[in-house]
Image (spheres, rainbow, N blue to C red):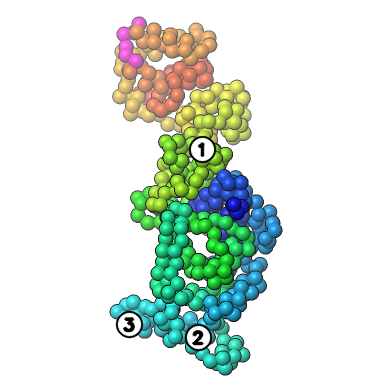
Amino acid sequence: MTRVRTRFAPSPTGPLHIGGVRTALYSYLFAKKHGGDFLLRIEDTDTARTVKGSEDVINESLNWCGIIPDEGITQGGPHAPYRQSERKSIYLQYAEQLLNNGKAYLAFDSEEDIKAWREKSAADNKGISAAYNYSTRSQMKNSLTLSEKDIARLKEDKTPYVIRLKVDPSDHVSFHDMIRDDVRFDSSQLDDRVLLKSDGMPTYHLANVVDDHLMEISHVIRGEEWLASTPHHILLYKAFDWKAPVFAHLPLFLKPDGKGKLSKRDGDRLGFPVFCTQFKNPDTGEITEGFREKGFERDAFVNFIAMLGWNDGTERELFDMKALIDHFSLERVHKAGAKFNFEKAVWFNQQYVRHLSNEELVHACYDELTKLHSNLDKHFISKYVELFRDRIDFKYELVKVGSYLYSDIEQYDLDTLKKKWKPEAENFMLNFNELLASNSLVSANEIEIETKKLIEQHQLGMGNILPVLRILLTGTMKGPSIFETILLLGKDKSMERIKKLNYLLNS
């Protein structure tokens, strides 16, 4: 069996979109599942769209995700260079090979010529413009219609030209896609794609086919937007007499409502990132936020991305990288587009945060907490983390979620306090403070038992007392056990806050 070799081949046009992360991840998982190689190749032949710094952020994003190439622009390898702009002479050689065997031809039509021709075609054909293909190429200025003398003259005059693929309308294309099963295209519907541009740079179609062949890529895993171009690629493999790789075209990432492809504008509008890591455009200064900067755990993010369009056939949702490699298969990738659900991404992060040890969470918040309040010790912070670890979605939330335990309460839920307060509970509050003053506060359980006894003695209901206590001690109705809260606050601070009752009721 041929060694499995996959590649991720992004264009350096900005930060790495999560759709690109998924393509890279699936390519990586497939290669590792089969003991193969994963390559990173930068396709930078479209120089007009290249954005400075993009290559670095692509590398940074893949490294953060743990998707580490075996070969690529950083690692090097036997098929270097892995940057297409450094392989220009290679493409010219293969374009000339196609010219020599009659599978391609020169086209001298200027952009203005083609635009005028399309406009006339649309006017003559009720709005339908013609494609540059087998039925129209005879009307154009190319090496199939010009004499050798005219061609020589045009070259001598340095008239710009491109090299186009010569598509035979009878040469139907069919192939098996690992996700979409058998796919067939009618070649008479295909245009004669440009392979080499007038500046000598290849188009995606020529460059990716040549590179995939020379780099011995066995499986091409890419987005479904490239499905329409695959017949041209199949024809190129045939023209070179090369064996084509196996193709797998992934479904699109859809907007949360399922209506259309997910874009940066959707993220800006709905308030979530659509890129892996943050990127600052050096030309515009625009900053795009990433999942990493949003506080996501790497493994949670990777797990979330993997599940957008794939499952292992069970109800299982949590997979670390090793489990993903073990369970992944392209046959389980869905054909339909995957709706993006940011709430689900947060849920994944929550699950991973809750699986972290208390020591890891203490480490995550220790520096910032001690910076805010230098009197906090590790024992307090450890107990604090224990109280709030199941109430956060992100590690950074630890610092603020229980701030009332280490600093003054900034705001009280006065509406609920006044609604829940019963004047007959006034003696209870006095006795409760006496209870705290005389209690050693050894355990939350002890405080709970004594508090419930006191409530019964005063013939009050838990629903009348505990909400009032909670608001007095924390300012809010939300939070962990009120008895654990008292234990961590300590008796002095707890008593001090309870004594503010009358002041707050009259506020």
Disc 2 target residue? 144
Q: Mark 3 and mark 2 in contact (Cβ < 8 Å)?
A: no
Q: Which residue type carries mark 3?
A: Ala
Q: Is residue 241 above or below residue 270?
A: below
Q: What are the residue bounds of the magenta stretch? A: 457-462
Disc 1 target residue? 319
Q: Give the mark toward the camera: 1 or 3.
A: 1
Could you tell me which residue is drawn at 51 percent across and 38 percent down? 319
Could you tell me which residue is drawn at 42 percent across and 60 percent down? 183
N-terminal of the two: label 2 or label 3?
A: 3
Characterize the local packing of mark 3: few (<14), some (14-19) or many (20 or more) Cα atoms within 10 angstroms: few
Assess whether residue 385 is covered by the magenta stretch.
no
**Residue at disc 2, secondary structure:** loop
Q: Which residue type carries mark 1?
A: Phe
**Residue at disc 1, secondary structure:** loop
Q: Is residue 342 above or below residue 213?
A: above
Task: State the residue lying farthest toward the top.
Answer: 457
Residue 123 image label: 3
Q: CA distance from mark 1 to mark 3?
A: 57 Å
Give x and y (percent) for residue 205.
Answer: 53, 68
Q: Is residue 405 above or below residue 119?
A: above
Q: Give the mark toward the camera: 2 or 3.
A: 2
